[in-house]
Image (cartoon, helix red, strand yellow):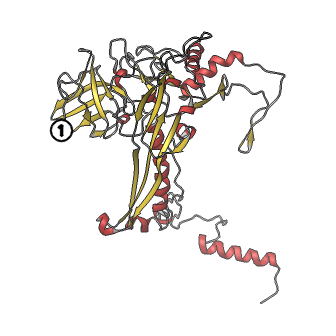
Amino acid sequence: MSNISIAEYLAQVNRSANASVLGENPLLKKAFTGTAYGVDGGSNTSGNIFTTTYGRKVWQALNNQTRFWNAIPHATWGNTAGWRVRTDRGTGRSRPVTELGTLPTPDVSDLQLVSGLPKIVATTFASSVKAMYTAQLEGGIGDILATENEHSQRDHVKELQQETLRMRWARVASATNSTNAVITIVTPRGNNFQIGDTCLIYDQSASANMGTDAGNDNPLTVDATTATTVTFTGEVFNATPVAGDILFVTGSGNNGVTSIDSIVEQDGRVLSTVGGDAGSEIGAYDLTQGGRTAGTWNAAATVSNNGGTARDLTLETLNSAIQAVRENGGEPKLIVTGHDQYFKLEELLQTQQRFMGIETYQVNVGSEKTFAGTRTGMELSTYMGIPILPDADAPKSADNGGTEIGSNVFVLDTDYLEVAVAQPTQYIENRDFFAVDALAVRGLFYTMAELRCYSFFHQAKITDLTA
């Protein structure tokens, strides 16, 4: 072989490669008469030489934030299911005494009893052996069981979060009441009710509750739900509900974790200007149905509402809620609301913002930069020193027509709130095909816990706000 330079050798190799792939030298000015081998045309279509494949990573198009659940203190359950609440100092046990006067008459404090059993929340997933095998092939997502396990962990905590923030009533749009009562909800809030919840209907025309027996409060048990319906299989109400009536979870009827919206409640709260005080029986724990009189120990210290008519959030309203908690001996440590009210609060406080000097500021965005300018807009972290936590799952009120409006605002003293955990999240996996009766592997996460409130008197909320 004759000696040639490296450059000439590489040129020959390139010419040879071009000839093998493209046929004749493509640079020659000669009409191309062969078959087109392009991806988008010719005898070989894209499906023959190119197939779209997808990365193994599964991205989330869901809101998996669990801010409120994370913010509330967590504690072990302990060896009891109930707790005592002191609601009275006793009569005449403290008074001035003259020099040789008699001592005050001893009296005992009033101690109230509250109890609540832990609630069980479960999340399941499964995968067939065929799916687990094929997912490992080219184009698959890899270990599908591990992927579903990871997703289920997120779903499980999200369910716990949503249960602690659910609103427990909705306005009736229509109903069928033969054999099985099926209630259609005005707004898509059917999922706020859960299987096992016990419910009543507030009959606005009669200003009384509607249950299974005429004239009393005998609740029905939820058997199934969708986004817009609640079904009571094999049960019917003693009269057919009509549009405008109110379906609500009654007394201690929460089958899931008790929500903060149920905890911070009071009797006689009018939910609409056309009538309806179902708020009087949206209970918690073992409290007597309809026994949460406003201003007493077992009701929220303050529930600021507007009878189902939306109104704007004002600093005066928020200040009144904070004041009420403090006057009852509490110290607010957390404000929880939706993002809508968070931005409204920013707008209310915008006039109080002060700028000291002028400073240019640039932000990197990928490989680009913004124009040099000034920082604008406010970001609130606290109000009066109280942390503000905007949460997308915060419950929203409904107006007189049942249309969903703005998020509620909760002013909470978290010294009296905790997630009591009876059993931390457990994971169980079943690979016994005979037990499953299928060639599949099943997984289960479950948690046993309850949101406890040791003083309703130190909590407050604001409802009926514009979005």
In front of the other: 156 or 264: 264
Quick one: which residue is furthest to the bottom in this view? Answer: 1
How many numbered discs sit on the rendered protein? 1
Residue 45 visible somewhere in the drawing? no
Q: Which residue is drawn at 27% across and 25% down?
A: 201
In front of the other: 416 or 360: 416
Quick one: which residue is furthest to the left in this view? Answer: 179
In front of the other: 395 or 412: 412
Q: Mark 1 points at which residue?
A: 234
Q: Where is residue 444 in the image (x, y as percent from the top left)?
A: 41, 56
User: Residue 206 is drawn in which quadrant?
Assistant: top left
Q: Position of residue 377 (x, y in %)?
A: 69, 25
Q: Position of residue 283 (x, y in %)?
A: 37, 28
Q: Relative to residue 282, is residue 12 depicted above or below?
A: below
Q: Residue at x 45, y 64 (%)?
A: 135
> Left or right: where does residue 362 sit relative to residue 166?
right
Q: Relative to residue 437, is residue 65 depicted above or below?
A: above
Quick one: which residue is furthest to the top in this view? Answer: 98
> Left or right: where does residue 391 sit relative to residue 190?
right
Q: Position of residue 22 (x, y in %)?
A: 60, 69
Residue 383 visible somewhere in the drawing? yes
User: Residue 11 is drawn in which quadrant?
Assistant: bottom right
> Left or right: where does residue 306 sit relative to residue 389?
left
Q: In which quarter of the image is the N terminus?
A: bottom right
SS type, badge 1 = loop
**For mark 1, does the 10 Å Cα neighbourhood hold few (<14), some (14 to 19), or many (20 or more) residues?**
few
Type of amino acid at the residue the image marks with label 1:
Gly
Q: Residue at x 42, y 60 (%)?
A: 428
Q: Relative to residue 204, is residue 443 depicted above or below?
A: below
User: Residue 237 is drawn in which quadrant?
Assistant: top left
